[in-house]
Image: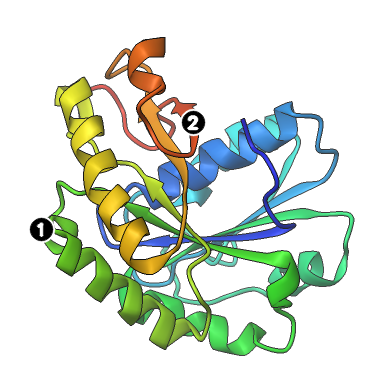
Amino acid sequence: MIVDDRRVRIVTGHYGSGKTEFAVNYAVQLVRQSCQKVALADMDIVNVYFRSREVRNELCREGIKVIDSSIGASADIPAIPAETYAPFEDKRYNYIIDLGGNDVGTIVLGRYKEFIDPNETDFFMVVNVFRPDTNSVEKILKQKESLEKSSGLCITGFINNSNLVWETQIEDVLHGNEMLSKVSEVTGIPVKYTSYVKEAVDIDDYVKSKLLGEIFPMKFYMRKEWM
């Protein structure tokens, strides 16, 4: 399911894209694919909702090292602990960074510039085409350019996470696939994964054959049934 990605994976995307849900599921899948050392850092210092640290206990049970930005406080504090540096230098780790959405959230990467090796880093942009700021090819391209400018990194892959939560239909995933196919054609950047939540929509093999990238089934870690 996870194939040929670089050791450090930075996951970003506009608000509501589902980047945290993808990052958490991605970390769990890495462990289950026999990766011995996996670390997930919550570097979202902008959004106080749907934070990967909220499922710390579940991730720890999977054997994932969780590094969160709240420095153990009960209130949410926009601070990044020194612990986030370690997996950059310890090459034994597969490192996933759950980065804040939009250009404001990516600014935090500036302090890691000297530690980020482009040759071992993927910068994934998660896209939900049903969000207002990414509901057209032009808007997706605008967000991509904004994220790249503020982070100083180039997007290496798109994640099609087009969904309407519990109301998601197969047609919705296919619509995202079509739009990101056009974005990929314009930019030359591949769609690395098409993700969907198995609890919300059932995708058969015929539909999977039409989708770009690796098919990435997920479960809801961040969103409860009533949400």
Task: Compare marks 1 and 2 and give the one earlier in the sequence.
Answer: 1
What residue lies at 35% left-to-right and 71% top-to-bottom? 46
Q: Residues within 10 Å of mark 2 (few under 14, many from 20)?
A: many
In which quadrant of the rendered image does the N terminus lie? Answer: top right
Residues at marks 1 and 2 touching, judged by CB atoms closer than 8 Å: no
What residue lies at 49% left-to-right and 49% top-to-bottom? 52
In which quadrant of the rendered image does the C terminus lie? Answer: top left
What residue lies at 53% left-to-right and 42% top-to-bottom? 24
Residue 91 falls in which quadrant of the image? bottom right
* Residue 175 shown left or right of residue 125 in the figure: left
State the SS at label 1.
helix
**Relative vertical location of residue 35 with respect to residue 69 in this rendering, above or below:** above
- Residue 195 % position (x, y): 41, 34
State the SS at label 2.
strand
Q: Name the residue under label 2.
A: 216
| Front position in the image: 32 or 72 | 32
* Residue 65 shown left or right of residue 45 in the figure: right
Q: Which amino acid does label 2 sit on?
A: Phe
* Residue 148 shown left or right of residue 66 in the figure: left
- Residue 70 % position (x, y): 52, 65
Residue 102 falls in which quadrant of the image? bottom left
Q: Mark 1 points at which residue?
A: 132
**Relative vertical location of residue 96 with respect to residue 105 in this rendering, above or below:** above
